[in-house]
Image (cartoon, grey):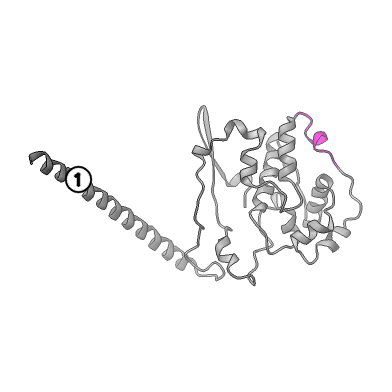
Amino acid sequence: EIIPVTGVQTCALPICLMKLADFGLARSLTQDNEDDSKVLTDYVATRWYRAPEILLGATKYTKAVDMWSLGCILGELLSGKAIFPGTSTMNQLDRIIEVTGKPSPEVLEEIDAPYAATMLDSLGDVKRRNLRDMFPNAAEDALDLMSKLLDFSPVTRYNINQTLEHPYVAQFHNPDEEPVCEKPVEVPINDDTKYKIGDYRKKLYEDIVKKRKEQRSAKKTRSERSEERRVGKECRSRW
C-alpha cells in the first residue's frame, strides 16, 4: 500500500528524495498472473487511500490501485488533511463518488466485482463536489493531475509514466535519474502459502548470504581481470 507513513523522506537541500518502504502486503504480479485462479487480497491498503475497485471487492486488480493512493496523497498535500476520511467501506465509496460521480456500466465491467452494482445502488443519489471548491488555492495543473489519478476507472487512470510527464511535476522529471526495472520481480518463496516466521527469516538470511557471495565473487573476478590486463600490458612493453 502507498500511504503517507510508508514513505521515507531524505533531504539534502536543494534536493529532496522520497523512497517507498514497508512492503509487508506487496505481491508479485508475475506470480499472480501465472494462474488465473489465484485472487488478490480484497482487504488491503488503508481505507482512506484504498482504490474504488478494492472497496467494491475486486480480487483482480493492477498497479492502478497505487496510482489512486498517489492521488489521495496529492490532495492531502494540497489541503493538509485526508480528502476521503471514510468511516466504513460504504462511507468511503460515498465520499469518493461525491468527487468522481457514479461509474458507468462499462467501468464496472472493467473492475469485474460481482457485487459492485448492488453496492453502488445502495448509496442512492450522491451530491457531487467540485475539486476547485475542495482546493480553492490549488494550481490548475495540480487539480488536473489529481483528477487523472482519481479516475474511477483503473484502465484510464493515469499510470506512473503519464504522471511523471504531467506539467505539474515536469520540473522534477529527469529520466536519467529514474531507473526502470526491466525484468519482473519474483518472490523467492511461495506467495500463496503462509509459513512460520522462522521460515521467512531463514529464507531472508539465505538470500542475503547468497547475494553477498555473488558480490564478492564478481568483485574478485573484476580484480583478476584487472591484474591480467596489467600483466599483459607490462609484457607487451618489454617486447
- Residue at screen point 7% across, 40% down: 238
Q: Is residue 12 above or below residue 239?
A: above
Give coordinates of residue 203: x percent, y percent: 43, 65
Q: Could you classify mark 1 by the number of other residues whose Cα lies within 10 Å: few (under 14), some (14-19), or many (20 or more)?
A: few
Give coordinates of residue 117: x percent, y percent: 84, 62
Q: Is residue 212 left or right of residue 175?
A: left
Q: Is residue 201 above or below residue 3?
A: below
Q: Is residue 40 left or right of residue 83?
A: left
Q: Is residue 170 left or right of residue 221?
A: right
Quarter of the figure with residue 32: bottom right
Give coordinates of residue 97: x percent, y percent: 82, 49
Image quarter hosting the C terminus: top left
Circle 1: residue type? Arg
Q: For the view shown, which residue lies furthest in the front direction?
A: 239
In the rendered structure, which segment of residues is drawn in magenta? Answer: 129-137
Residue that carries the numbered disc 1 in the rendered image:
229
Q: Is residue 74 magenta?
A: no
- SS class, disc 1: helix
Q: Is residue 206 above or below residue 64?
A: below
Quarter of the figure with residue 60: bottom right
- Residue at screen point 49% across, 38% down: 177
Of 79 and 51, the residue lying toward us: 51
- Residue at screen point 58% across, 33% down: 172
- Residue at screen point 45% across, 68% down: 199
Q: Is residue 216 above or below residue 203?
A: above
Q: For the view shown, which residue lies furthest in the right direction?
A: 125
Of 239 and 152, the residue lying toward us: 239
Give coordinates of residue 23: x percent, y percent: 55, 54
Q: For the view shown, which residue lies furthest in the top direction?
A: 14
